[in-house]
Image (tube, rainbow, N blue to C red):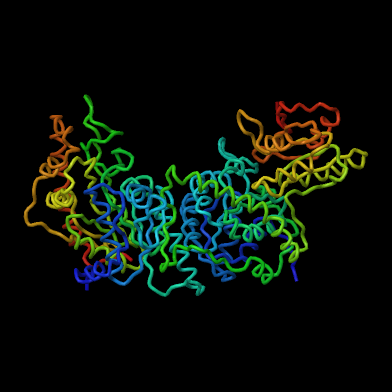
């Protein structure tokens, strides 16, 4: 049975918040929703979550010493190593458990949070290593498509045409031209892993995936599209509406790769053109003033269409063919 | 009964680790440290220990995993050398700031570039301000002993500071020597159980580890780290004395060799001290009052002990197995600064030797003594031993 509203309400009634109010993330930020939904799901399922975070908005805004917004064990080490850090904690858990030295017999689950910079780019090595070694942990990427904490620099996740300070749009350049790195396929290719996308527009899809990830024995990974209202130049209340559009335009398909088996978890009946998604976000405004950017949008449309077709075929072709 | 084994320094360290039986070891191989990890992995594979071993994909992740594990409440160790330590560098500082009593043998090796896999002390010096306790071992026996001592010291509540044990690449790590291994039980009782106060895995008392420390607290936390090292300085004689009880081997801040009436003193770290002791003996036979000071403890730097050992001597020559580009050699500058408070300042001279594993011979170590005896030392002239010019 997937986690349901009743279980979550129960936690709210008991004021048993793993991640509390009082953090200093921006109004409208999508990262705290991700953190809250994930940790509450773990709690609702009866697990004791132990959280690691990479350096980034979620970390700097929730643990300003001597305050903390975490009501559960939490560790931050550095930017690029949350996966390695949590793998050490998980190894310690196994060792202390074997030796009968743990003070609790409640089931502990390890959850690591990282932004896109800490995941797609600088943290990819430590994440890949931790997954290959098969540590039992859930890694949640909150993907806001740039280095927002340090002021809107480009990352391996930044889409073409999105204004970014280290790949700005100028008189002769339309900013970044490269497409996003396909992180879920990269992680899925580790084979011993449950990997999925999610979106802040669809909390129940996300929570169902968190549940799968926690129950999966071994590494699990969820990439959640989570806008930064500040640098995406969108109204504070619009995050989930925009991610909904991302799903409806095939920009961010909701799917999972469970040990090699593909499954699309949301199949919109009618798709919208990707241009609609791009026009709804302020960070593309400058690029849209460049006539050549329209060609880029056409290219992106072709790309997302092809990827969708490919996903459908993968879903068909990999049915029940678990690799591990 | 202790047993004497003919083993390498790497094997000696691995035996100490086996007897300590840490909860977690996360490590990555790097020459010349690799045999430590290999020996230890074999102990795990054979069931000689029940440590959870995490064979990570880089030294950066080794130190990161070790931080996660130690914070979780597990007794945790790793080992590295040179470029591996350089890759860990960022997290080496974080481990110290989180007050995690991690123990890490360093098999000293030249830092690239140019790439070189042989021994010098550029790696140890590179992290000298990271906030770790740094012990130096002349030979395999000392490397074994120091690994056990470091574990006890680092975990003391008033210390809570990670510790590294330095041993010379290839010379100590790969050279076979007779090493006395204590009884497993003796080591187990000596190190005891590690009971951290605020483990991450204490889910009933959740703690936030590694928070953001702004200008309002960062300074205070550094001040506390300084206190941890001051306490390590105070605790060391006690831990050494306790270790002497189980081993019969006496350690101190400084290894003083023929220093009672010495007039010409050499200061050198690690394996070259063995050669230096031989040279001191040769000079003593000729009636020259030579002596040697070998720091066992580099951080916390035993300034008071150095001062009392060197004050009033005729000349002091300091040997460094690394350079500090554009500045005085690291050990030399520390010794020189310690001598500022000397009542009778000796003549001093700085010698750089053995970089990148270059051989250190007795005839080479005679040179600083000869120059000291002739009164030819110049405190501002860095001199090189065995350099092809």
Position of A22 with respect to A288 (left or right) is right
| Location of residue A269 by image quarter | bottom left
Residue A157 or residue A210, whichever sits in front: A210
**Number of marks drawn:** 0
Query: Looking at the image, which residue is at 19% across and 56% down?
Result: A254
- Does A216 appear above or below B342? below
Quarter placement of the N terminus of chain A: bottom left
Task: Farthest residue to the top: give it.
Answer: A171
Query: Looking at the image, which residue is at 13% across and 34% down?
Result: A294
Residue B145 or residue B32, whichever sits in front: B145
How far across and down, in percent of the image, does residue A89 sit?
A: 45, 61
- Does B115 appear above or below A111? above
Query: Looking at the image, which residue is at 37% across and 55% down?
Result: A68
Position of A91 with respect to B341 (left or right) is left
- Does B95 appear above or below B386? below
How far across and down, in percent of the image, does residue B23 sit?
A: 53, 66
Quarter placement of the C terminus of chain A: bottom left
Residue B4 or residue A94, whichever sits in front: A94
Task: Farthest residue to the left: give it.
Answer: A270
| Location of residue A209 by image quarter | bottom left
How far across and down, in percent of the image, does residue B121 sit?
A: 64, 42
Position of A89 with respect to A116 (left or right) is right
Query: Looking at the image, which residue is at 31% across and 72% down?
Result: A46
């Amino acid at each position: 049975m997937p986690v349901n509203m009743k279980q979550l309400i129960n936690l709210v009634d008991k004021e048993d918040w793993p991640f509390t109010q009082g953090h200093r993330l921006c109004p409208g930020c999508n990262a705290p929703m991700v953190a809250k939904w994930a940790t509450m799901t773990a709690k609702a399922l009866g697990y004791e979550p132990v959280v690691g975070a990479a350096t980034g908005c979620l970390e700097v805004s929730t643990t300003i010493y001597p305050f903390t917004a975490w009501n559960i064990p939490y560790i931050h080490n550095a930017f690029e190593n949350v996966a390695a850090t949590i793998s050490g904690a998980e190894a310690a858990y196994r060792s202390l458990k074997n030796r009968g030295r743990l003070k609790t017999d409640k089931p502990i689950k390890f959850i690591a949070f990282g932004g896109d910079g800490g995941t797609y780019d600088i943290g990819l090595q430590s994440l890949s290593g931790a997954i290959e070694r098969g540590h039992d942990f859930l890694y949640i990427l909150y993907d806001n498509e740039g280095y927002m904490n340090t002021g809107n620099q480009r990352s391996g996740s930044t889409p073409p045409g999105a204004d970014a300070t280290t790949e700005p749009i100028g008189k002769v350049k339309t900013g970044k031209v490269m497409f996003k790195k396909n992180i879920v396929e990269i992680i899925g290719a580790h084979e011993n892993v449950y990997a999925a996308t999610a979106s802040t527009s669809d909390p129940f899809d996300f929570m169902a995936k968190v549940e799968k990830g926690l129950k999966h024995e071994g590494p699990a990974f969820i990439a959640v599209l989570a806008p930064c209202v500040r640098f995406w130049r969108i109204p504070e209340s619009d995050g989930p509406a925009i991610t909904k559009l991302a799903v409806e335009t095939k920009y961010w398909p909701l799917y999972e790769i469970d040990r090699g088996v593909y499954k699309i978890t949301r199949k919109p009946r009618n798709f919208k053109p990707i241009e609609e998604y791009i026009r709804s976000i302020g960070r593309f405004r400058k690029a849209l003033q460049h006539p050549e950017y329209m060609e880029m949008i056409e290219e992106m449309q072709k790309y997302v269409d092809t990827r969708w077709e490919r996903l459908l075929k993968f879903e068909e072709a990999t049915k029940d063919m678990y690799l591990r | 009964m202790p047993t004497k084994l003919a083993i390498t320094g790497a094997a000696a360290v691995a035996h100490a680790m086996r007897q300590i039986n840490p909860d977690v070891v996360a490590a990555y191989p790097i020459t010349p440290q690799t045999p430590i990890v290999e020996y230890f992995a074999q102990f795990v594979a054979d069931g000689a220990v029940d440590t959870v071993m995490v064979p990570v994909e880089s030294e950066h992740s080794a130190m990161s995993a070790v931080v996660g594990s130690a914070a979780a409440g597990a007794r945790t160790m790793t080992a590295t050398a040179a470029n591996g330590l350089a890759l860990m560098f960022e997290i080496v500082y974080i481990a110290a700031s989180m007050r995690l009593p991690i123990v890490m043998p360093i098999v000293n090796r030249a830092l690239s570039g140019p790439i070189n896999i042989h021994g010098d002390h550029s790696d140890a010096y590179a992290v000298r301000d990271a906030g770790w306790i740094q012990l130096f071992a002349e030979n395999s026996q000392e490397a074994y002993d120091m690994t056990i001592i470091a574990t006890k010291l680092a975990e003391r509540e008033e210390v809570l500071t990670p510790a590294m044990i330095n041993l010379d690449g290839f010379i100590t790590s790969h050279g076979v020597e007779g090493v006395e291994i204590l009884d497993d039980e003796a080591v187990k009782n000596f190190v005891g159980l590690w009971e951290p106060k605020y483990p991450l895995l204490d889910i009933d008392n959740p703690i936030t580890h590694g928070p953001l420390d702004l200008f309002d607290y960062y300074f205070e936390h550094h001040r506390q780290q300084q206190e941890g090292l001051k306490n390590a300085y105070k605790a060391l004689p006690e831990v050494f004395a306790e270790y002497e009880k189980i081993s019969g081997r006496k350690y101190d801040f400084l290894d003083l060799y023929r220093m009672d009436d010495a007039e010409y003193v050499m200061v050198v770290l690690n394996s070259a001290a063995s050669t230096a002791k031989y040279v001191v003996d040769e000079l003593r036979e000729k009636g020259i009052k030579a002596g040697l000071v070998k720091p066992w403890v580099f951080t916390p730097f035993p300034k008071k002990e150095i001062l009392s050992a060197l004050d009033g001597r005729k000349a002091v020559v300091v040997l460094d197995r690394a350079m500090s580009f554009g500045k005085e050699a690291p050990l030399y500058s520390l010794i020189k600064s310690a001598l500022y408070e000397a009542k009778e300042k000796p003549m001093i001279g700085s010698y750089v030797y053995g970089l990148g594993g270059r051989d250190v011979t007795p005839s080479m170590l005679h040179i600083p003594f000869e120059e000291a005896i002739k009164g030819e030392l110049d405190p501002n002239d860095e001199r090189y031993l065995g350099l092809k010019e």
